[in-house]
Image (tube, coloured by chain):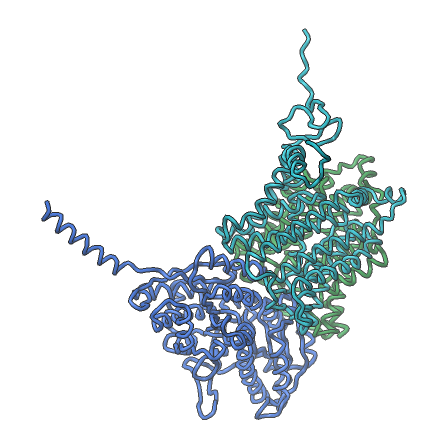
Amino acid sequence: MTGPLRVWSLPWIFLYLRHEVLALPGRSVALLFVLFLLVLPLFTQDPYWLRVLTLTAIFALYAASWDLLSGYTGQVSLGHAFFFGLSGYVSAILGRELGLPPWLTVPLGASLAALAGVFVGLPSLRVRGPYLSLVTLAFPIIALGLVFVFPKITGGELGLSGLPRLGQSRLQEYYIVVFTFLLSTLFLWKLGGSRIGLFLHAIREDEVAVRMVGVNTVRYKLLAFGASAFFAGLAGGLHAHFLRVVGPDSLSVFNSIQPIVWSVFGGLATIYGPVAGTFLLFPLLEFLRVVEEVRMLAFAFLILLVMRFLPQGVVRGVLDRLEETCPRCKVRNAFTRRRCRACGVELRLPEKEVVA
Amino acid sequence: MFRISMSKWLTLGGLAVLTSLAWAQTLRIGVVGPMAFVQGAHTWYGATLAAEEINRAGGIQVGDRRYRIELLRVDTNEMLSVTDAATAVERAITAQRVDFLVGGFRSEAVLAMTEVAADYKRIFIITGAGLDGILAGRVDRNYERFKYLFRVSPTRSSDLARTSLLLLGEVVQAVRQQLGIPRPKVAILAERAAWADPLVETATRLIAAPPPQGYGAEVAGTWRPSAVATDVTSELTAIQRAGAQVIYTVLSGPVGVPFGRDWGRLRIPAAPVGINVEAQQETWLKATDNLGNYVATLSSLAPGVAITPKTIPFITSFQARFKEFPIYTASGAYGALYVLADALNRAGTLDVEAVVKALEATDFVGPSGRIVFDKTHDVTWGPSFTTGLGVQWVGNRMQAFWPRNWRVGDKVISYAGVRPYQLPPWVVEAWRR
Amino acid sequence: MFAAILVNGLVLSGIYGMLALGFALTYGVARILNLAHTAFYMVAAYALFFFLGWTGFAGAALLGVLVVLLLALAAYGLLLEPLREHEATVLIVTIALALLLQEVVLLLFGGHFRSVPALLPGYVEVLGVRVAQQALLALGFAAAVLLAAWALLKGTRLGLGIRAAAQDQEAAELVGISLSRAGYWAVGLGALLAALAGLAVAPMATLEPHMWNPPLLVVLAAVVLGGLGSLPGALLGALVLAFAEVLVVNLVPGGAFLRTAVALFIMVLVLVARPEGLFGVGFAEER
């Protein structure tokens, strides 16, 4: 190669793919997954499947946002539906009162949700652990009560319907949602891997120690709340406009529990965990329609089984079997390798020879 | 050999012609509803009964072809999730390829489901959800998109209100006459739900207005429990303290059962009447621990009451086949299938636009009344159309008390098998001077 | 009106108190936020309904309690104890367990409402307020059960061990209390209390597969309000929230549907003022 390697040059991309992505099964699967989402419509445009995948992407974003708050920072939120539903309602009401299109109202709704996130985060400064979780639980329920107290604005238990569409066709909506999902997840992933993410991990492990080092934990905790709420709101707005209906279901306790189940199933404090969890569980639940009566039963039973044997989450459990960490340089390697790809050290100690 | 082949060909040819005549094509009809609940289950049962009858009679004749009906059971899980319901309907249309849809129960879910049906231009006949806004404001304002939606049951909420208020009038009259109270007090107990708000407003006005427009009574107070409340003793004790003789109930959710049970257990001296969907089911007494006697409610069907010549045969075959007394979603689905078959017959083609036109011209007598659609594709309410019945639980049985000598214009309407309304004995005891 | 509030509030406190105490026991000792707690209460009520078809009330009650105990101990032993270190996973497992129980009940009994005949039909007038006799029986039963639980916890060695483990797990282990056995005892007792609450309430309530939802929220709020890990706190929390509910229904009849929202709002207020709940035990020192 002559000349300096630029990041966007084709050779660089090939090298990157070969040495960083395809070297590990986990990352290869992630690449395949992204490609699959992008090129699926070339193979099938069945509206039902597009619908399932669009909803899955929306919920995966929702789950990833929960993970940022609860998995990384350890502030377990039992009321995440508050942000999801609030954003949906705000987007619908703005659209109705001001006539704004969805590409404006959805980000506006998400921004308001972010503010709400900071607001909910304020009590977190005083209460910890399970107490905090229950405080977060209270917010969507109180919001639900307010929805019923002001039915003229919120539509009461019927919600608001006839919301404007996200795009002209099902295919367009699919791509809008998928792109938003991929970009947001990338952002969350980068955030989690950045210095900020490091602080969040540290706050979860031992907040007192972090404060002793001089870090302003208040700022980071509120940041986690705000960012998490923003993306949850984004998911909520997309959901409302995709279904064209927003109702009190979006604030329900069940809706708060969903991202928790998906995230824990996939693996906490990773962004790929919740995404994987959602993409595994949500289509499964759809698929189980063939045995309608036992659908929820089978679903619950499956969760119990998997959690019992893979308590770290499915993705972690699988990755731990497929990948190993180099003992010297800590780089991840595929299990098929004998030597580390970065420093050349033997990954497993050789069998001891028996000296007679 | 040629001769044998000839006769063989002739027989084969003859058989082919015969089989192609006998071979019926199928029409796939999706029955949608919350199948784990009685409302959904009865939708399925009613549709099954109608489909079997129609198929036994040779199927539906559309133009020069005969079609047999194939029903698909679509469990929407609408009680728990509106998203789920809409997805289920989309799946039914795209993956399961249904030609028509019948059913629906929970109004907010039906709003979403009908959006999907409208997207795909599939005819959807609603048999269980009463919200006015499912059709009003849609079929009239955006006819091209929503013309595929029709409703056969229940009558829309505002019409349910009219009937229930007529029932209230009956009971207020009974209190006035039998207890000698010139100005009875009526407590309003309505679940906290959007559909109940207009009824509460109308009732409040009507109760206090002097006759003949109103009932010349007094409103003792308005209580609004949650639709899923499991305990209404506080509300009932307050109603008793307020001195009411009548309770006007507007309850469609599960709260109807605790209401009946607590009311009966505490023997609140006020007679309940109005809408109580739980009390329409034959499991009412078991659910209320046998304390639900004397509760009165609006309903579609009652044992032994022939609203139309088809009522009793329908009830009898339903009970024989499914061992349960049908609720309104059953008679609704039954009627819907026949209405659809009749419209297909008249249209002579499967082209959806023609079928919609044919449906609009429907005039069909079903088990719960005469079905004629108005401008918004909703079932018409009125004395010679569909009004529903007033039923009351007496002696552990459901009996009808309305319409009995119902004066409309210069007509007096009474159905055979209707008995007079009875005040609960402890109410009589508490108030008779 | 005051009388109505007092009487209805007391009855409700008894029920919530039993549920809250059981929940607090399970959390305090086994450190498990058992979101399936009220699902056990539901199973007990349905088991009573089912067995009443075979034997009298006493027999059915006994069988119901046994069923719930077996279920709880099996769930703890097979699912929850092996996952002790993964708190989030434990939470999901209890949710999944609750959903599983709900679906099983739905499959076996359908979505119809069921009822269990009352032991004492009829009503009495107390302070001018009509109260169902069954409600008074439930209140008396709740009081008896709570007293018995109190006697157990304060007066026996087992109770001492449980209380010690609830207060400080590390110190308890240091003095030789087997945390594993204490965990089993606490889960068993917690489930027993939930089952007894189910038996007491069944004759008054309507049985349906989602009946475990509303009490769960109230119980969570009550236990947090009183302070996690504190048993008297749980009872006090239950009392406060029961009266809050009854007050809302009586003073704001049009707002009766806001009961749960108000209960949780009160919880938030108390927590902002006292972050550890009313009698809370701080867990900061535990690693």
Q: Colour of chain C?
A: green
* Quadrant in which residue B209 is drawn: bottom right
Q: Give the percent coordinates (x, y) of residue A243.
A: 59, 61
For this view, does C138 lie left or right of residue B386?
right
* Residue at x 81%, y 40% (from the top left corner): C287
Residue C205 in which image quadrant: bottom right
Left or right for A268, reference B327:
right
Q: Is residue B102 left or right of residue A314?
A: left
Q: Specify the colour of chain A.
A: cyan
Chain B shown in which color? blue
Residue situated in front as seen by the camera: C185 or A54 = A54
Q: Is residue B232 visible?
A: no
Q: Quadrant of the N terminus of chain A?
A: top right
Nearest to the observer: residue A174 or residue A347: A174
User: At which x and y percent is residue C13?
Assistant: 74, 61
Check the image and name the residue furthest to the front.
Answer: A2
Quadrant in the rendering for residue A105: bottom right
The structure residue drawn at horizontal position 48% and vertical position 69%, both measured from the top left corner, is B126
Task: Name the residue at 67% across, 6% down.
Answer: A356
Of residue B425 and residue B167, the one placed in the foreground of this image is: B167
The answer to whether residue C252 is above or below residue B6 is: below
